[in-house]
Image (cartoon, helix red, strand yellow):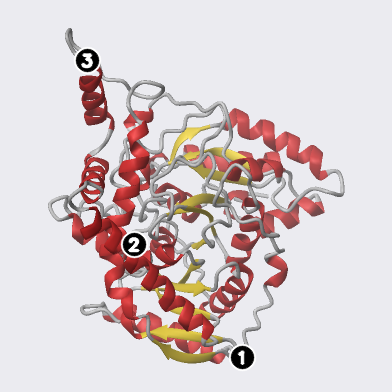
Amino acid sequence: MTDLNKLGLAEARDLLRKGETTSVELTQSCLTAIDAADALNAFVHKTPELALERAKAADERLKGDDAPAMCGLPIGIKDLFCTKGVDTQAGSRILQGFKPEYESTVSQNLIDNGAVMLGKLNMDEFAMGSSNETSVYGNVVSPWRRNNDDADLTPGGSSGGSASAVAADLCLAATGTDTGGSIRQPAAFTGTVGIKPTYGRCSRWGTVAFASSLDQAGPMTKSVRDAAIMLEAMCGHDAKDSTSADLAVPNFEAMLTGDIKGKKIGIPKEYRMDGMPAEIEQLWADGTAMLKAAGAEIVDISLPHTKYALPAYYVIAPAEASSNLARYDGVRYGHRAKLEAGDGITEMYEKTRAEGFGHEVQRRVMIGTYVLSAGFYDAYYNRARRVRTLIKKDFEDVFAAGVDAILTPATPSAAFGLGEMTDADPVQMYLNDVFTVTVNLAGLPGISVPAGLDAQGLPLGLQLIGKPWEEGDLLNTAYALEAAAGFVAKPGNWW
């Protein structure tokens, strides 16, 4: 069978179970596609030998009756997850040459479930970015193109390599991380599905930290069913992560009935932003109509503190980043600057960080250090934390009133061209996160589902926000929305 790389997880799993293909054949098909797609710059550390070795082991395991759902399925791993013996750079020069001696819990869970790692995927440096233009490896390019236009487009960020690879069928699925929208925004830009689970559902151990109270891993897939399969494999309690929830992981796929009759879906008035493109407004209205037609009850809701979410996020996230990134000092691992005679430890720190961190990371570290400094701690950081509590309470009040899920746009626009948002005004880039950061601040699960194309033929996504720990219910609502939207568009292979 040709084009095995174009399969999703569920289809490939079923073929493996029937003996109609092998993990080695699936893996080889993906490796061939990866080698032909260097123009996308999605895979930055290829591991073909390791992939084929794991694929052969998976084929042996599949001969038994107890092979898990992910067994033999080839996936990509975002460069933020530590992978034993394989380069892990978080898209940064400062971690050049770092090969961990351990495996992150999420990637280990996937290995234990028989998944096959094809390689490491490109990303914004330390996951700081919305367009995958801050990576030491260079920009990731989206496989999508505007109608009659050859301009390179962003796949979104920070999980841009993951989104591009899944959309271009270089892998069956990929891991991503989401601190302020870094799974959901790139999924929306590339016509794929991305879910950020409840904070604490996936272990953060062995994942390079950006903002520890916001970071959460999740899958990026070709369908909602695939997201359910992969999320179950990634989740689970981990004693090595103090924020990991000691909760049983349900069979998310078994919860996909598509029946949402009687479910109450909230439409927040605060998400109707000034200047929102008519296409996004229409997509939201269409999505609302689809859920209503599927039997859901649509209710208008208010999340009054939404307008403060973006500024609160861009205080809290840089503050935590400045603390987390203090460990990169050129002493223990990664890049160390060349020193001149007379240089001491202070000069080593300064030169190493100046050379090792890119401009966006430097900007956020400086903002974070500023808001944590003695004179401004209360004025900025503590105030942002109080706002965060109010945002969380807004959601709690809505869910307490009987709302089961909330429907919003995923992004304020379709994908933009690489280089179109200049470095001169970083706030314009930060506005890409306007619909997604609230979910991280409140620790809630959120999913982006492709729901249509804009006038230029680019994908647009809708976001569903669910109750904490109820990813199964959220996935089922997303499953119903996916079925109603009937999104099947794929990018043309120009690369």
The secondary element bearing badge 3 is classed as loop
Between 89 and 223, the one lying in front of the other is 89
Q: CA distance from mark 3 to mark 1?
A: 67 Å
- Residue at image position (54%, 78%) is 481
- Looking at the rendered structure, the kind of residue marked 1 is Gly
- Looking at the rendered structure, the kind of residue marked 2 is Arg
Residue placed under numbered mark 2 in the picture: 385
Looking at the image, residue 132 sits to the left or right of residue 112; the answer is left
Label 2 Cα neighbours within 10 Å, binned few <14 / some 14-19 / many ≥20: some
Q: Are marks 2 and 3 in contact (CB under 8 Å)?
A: no
Looking at the image, residue 494 sits to the left or right of residue 5; the answer is left
- Vertical position of residue 224 compared to residue 360: above or below: below
User: What percent of the width, then of the height, locates residue 174?
Assistant: 53, 50
Q: CA distance from mark 2 to mark 1?
A: 36 Å
Q: Is residue 459 visible?
A: no
Which badge, 2 or 1, is on the more N-terminal residue?
1
- Vertical position of residue 395 compared to residue 382: above or below: below
Between 415 and 145, the one lying in front of the other is 415
- Vertical position of residue 441 compared to residue 122: above or below: below
User: What percent of the width, then of the height, locates residue 395?
Assistant: 45, 76
User: Residue 140 bears which disc, if any?
Assistant: none
User: Residue 262 bears which disc, if any?
Assistant: 1
Q: CA distance from mark 2 to mark 3?
A: 37 Å
User: What percent of the width, then of the height, locates residue 201?
Assistant: 58, 57
Q: Is residue 276 visible?
A: yes
